[in-house]
Structures are given as C-alpha cells and as structure tokens.
Image (spheres, rainbow, N blue to C red):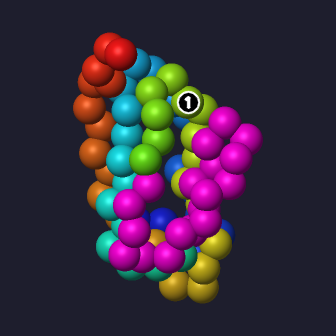
Amino acid sequence: RLKPGESIGEHTTGKNEESLVVLRGQGEARVEGHAITFTGPALVYIPSASRHNVVNTGSELLEYVYVVAPAQAP
C-alpha cells in the first residue's frame, strides 16, 4: 500500500522479473526511464535487471500485490 505521493524507491530485482497486480488506485511505474501509468485494476510487468520505482500519483491509497519470480533463460 502506498499513500498519495508515496513511492517504494528505485531498485532492481536482479535476475528476477516482477509483476504488479494493481487492486485499486492510480500510479506510475518508472522502469528504466520509461513511465507506465496505470489505474487499478491493472497488471504491470517489470523485466529482470530493470531499475524501477512505483509511485502513487493519485489522491487515494494505491493497493497492489507484487509477484517476483526467477526470469527464464531465452
């Protein structure tokens, strides 16, 4: 859960990929310099080894679940 204006802080999940299952709220995923805006319900994919941040850009609570899994080799 993120309050309005709050972010998780830029980070990477290394060799893992990540999906955000957005339950409600409005936000932006900033992935390697690209902004992905979303309004829940939504699904956002973040590739492995990507620097990213999630920001609540709305006026209400942003609720989401993140799922992290090892990336599969091509």
Report which quarter residue 24 is drawn in: bottom left
Residue situated in front as seen by the camera: 9 or 71: 71
Q: Quadrant of the C terminus?
A: top left
Q: Position of residue 28 (x, y in %)?
A: 60, 62
Question: Is residue 42 shown above or below 34?
Answer: below
Q: Position of residue 53 (x, y in %)?
A: 58, 47
Q: Residue at x 47, y 41 (%)?
A: 46
Is residue 62 shown to the viewer in this render? yes
Instruction: Answer yes or no: is residue 13 visible.
Output: no
Q: Is residue 40 magenta?
A: yes
Q: Estimate how packed mark 1 is, as few (under 14), some (14 to 19) or many (20 or more) residues with alpha carbons within 10 Å.
A: many
**The residue positioned farthest toward the right in the image shown:** 33
Q: Residue at x 43, y 47 (%)?
A: 45
In the picture provided, is 7 more to the left or to the right than 61? Answer: right
Q: Which residue is mark 1?
A: 50
> x and y percent of residue 41 in the render?
37, 75
Is most of the magenta stretch helix, strand or loop? strand
Q: Which segment did they paint magenta?
A: 27-44
**Which structural element holds mark 1?**
loop
Horizontal side, residue 35 vs residue 45: left or right: right
Residue in the foreground of this view, choosing between 8 and 46: 46
**Residue furthest out toward the top:** 73
Q: Is residue 60 above or below residue 14?
A: below
Identify the image quadrant of residue 27: bottom right
